[in-house]
Image (cartoon, grey):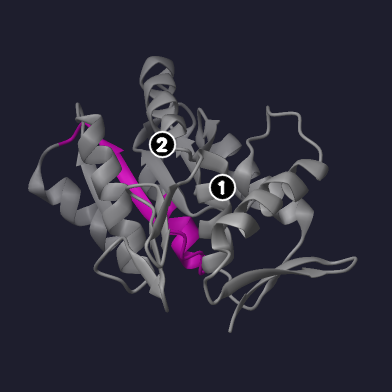
Amino acid sequence: MRFLLIEDNAKLASAVIERLTLDGHVVDHGPDIGSGRDFIATTEYDLILLDIMLPDGDGRSFLEAQRRLRDETPVIVMTARSEVSDRVTVLDLGADDYLTKPFDFSELEARCRAVLRRRGGSVTNQRRIGNLTFDPQAGTLTVGDRTTTLRAKELRLLEAFLGAQDQILSKAKLVDRLFSYDEDVSENAIEVYVGRLRKHLEGSPVSIVTMRGLGYRLQVS
């Protein structure tokens, strides 16, 4: 998944980015509301992690403005305020969840998974299609009686296709989903990952079809 972290505490931001990156996620970081808006203007995110007290304003006003613009990107608010009234306020403004600082990173990961499951209309992390079972939390893909542990980029690529079933995803779009802004990669790298993923999907009803000149589309037979 691609996350946007809006947090001005450099030490905390670095720790969050390191933890989520180890899980295979792509994380862009903005230290203030202005940079957060710049990121959102050019990139589509699966989840936003939002601090409240920021150098150029209040994260709650940012959240309220995004919801007013009909931006339904899931938002988890990270706040040092523990009062019930503060938590109620951010939820009423449109936050999907909140975390009180300091927090344990395992809780952060669990809350991210829970929010994404709810937005996807699922109560479990697993996805089943015929004889295929995909477990993003375990990082495994099972086809029949064959189980493969996916590499991080393969896992995120499959998530991208499953989240856009029957839609055409261009190479540029997939680069945007798999790599952060500071990673210098070419679109040819996508061909390599697609080739690997196709091998893992052999024997299942799921295939990745090349749409010449356009990109790729996930197809279920």
Return the residue nearer the eye: 165 or 181: 165
> Disc 2 or 1, which lies upstream in sequence?
2
Magenta residues span: 63-81
> Which amino acid, mark 1?
Glu
Residue found 12% across the figure and 50% down from its top: 85
In the image, residue 41 lies at what x, y percent? 66, 51
Residue 40 in magenta stretch: no
Judged from this view, the residue extending furthest toward the left is 84
Above-or-below relation of 31 to 151: above
Going by the image, does 131 lie left or right of 213? Answer: left
In the image: residue 162, left or right of residue 138: right
Q: Residue at x 10, y 41 (%)?
A: 83
- Position of residue 102 in the picture relative to residue 32 (left or right): left
Residue for point 24% across, 69% down: 123
In the image, what residue type sits under mark 2?
Answer: Asp
Which residue is under mark 2?
23
Q: What element does badge 1 sit on?
A: helix
Q: Position of residue 200 (x, y in %)?
A: 55, 56
Judge depth for marks 2 and 1 and give the one in front. 1
Q: Alpha-carbon neighbours of circle 2 within 10 Å: few (<14), some, or many (≥20)?
A: some
Q: Which residue is mark 1?
A: 154
Q: CA distance from mark 2 to mark 1?
A: 12 Å
